[in-house]
Amino acid sequence: MKEIAPKYNLKIEERVFAKGLDIIPGILAGEIDVAASALDAAVAGRAGGAPIFVVAGFAKGGARIVARPDAGIKTVAD
């Protein structure tokens, strides 16, 4: 993603979290717009009130891309 982002005027900063669920506070604080995480973290975060939804799977093993609803990402193409 970092290689193609400049082509679309996007700035990508990578942050690595020990567990998928650790990303939820950053999403709630508005510090993270898009995340690649395991499905269990997305489900647990959503169940805990985080305003996220699954956009698409991209790898074996349950990994998903999640984004805040106000990030404007509604489809895989976005």
Image (cartoon, rainbow, N blue to C red):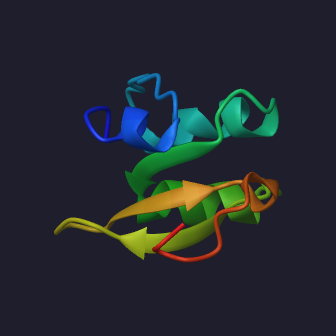
Specify the quadrant that holds the N terminus: top left
Q: Nearer the viewer, residue 73 or 22?
A: 73
Residue 70 place in picture, x, y as percent: 82, 56
Residue 32 place in picture, x, y as percent: 64, 34
Residue 30 located left or right of residue 77: right
Asked which quadrant contains residue 66, the reply is bottom right
The total of numbered circles placed on residues is: 0
- Which residue occupies 64% across, 64% down? 73
Q: Nearer the viewer, residue 75 or 55?
A: 75
- Which residue occupies 25% across, 34% down? 3
Residue 69 place in picture, x, y as percent: 77, 62
- Which residue occupies 42% across, 26% down? 17
- 70 is higher (above) or lower (below) than 32: below
Q: Nearer the viewer, residue 4 or 59?
A: 4
Residue 44 located left or right of residue 21: right
Residue 13 located left or right of residue 54: left
Asked which quadrant contains residue 78, the reply is bottom right
Residue 44 place in picture, x, y as percent: 61, 59
Residue 63 located left or right of residue 14: left
- Which residue occupies 81% across, 29% down? 29
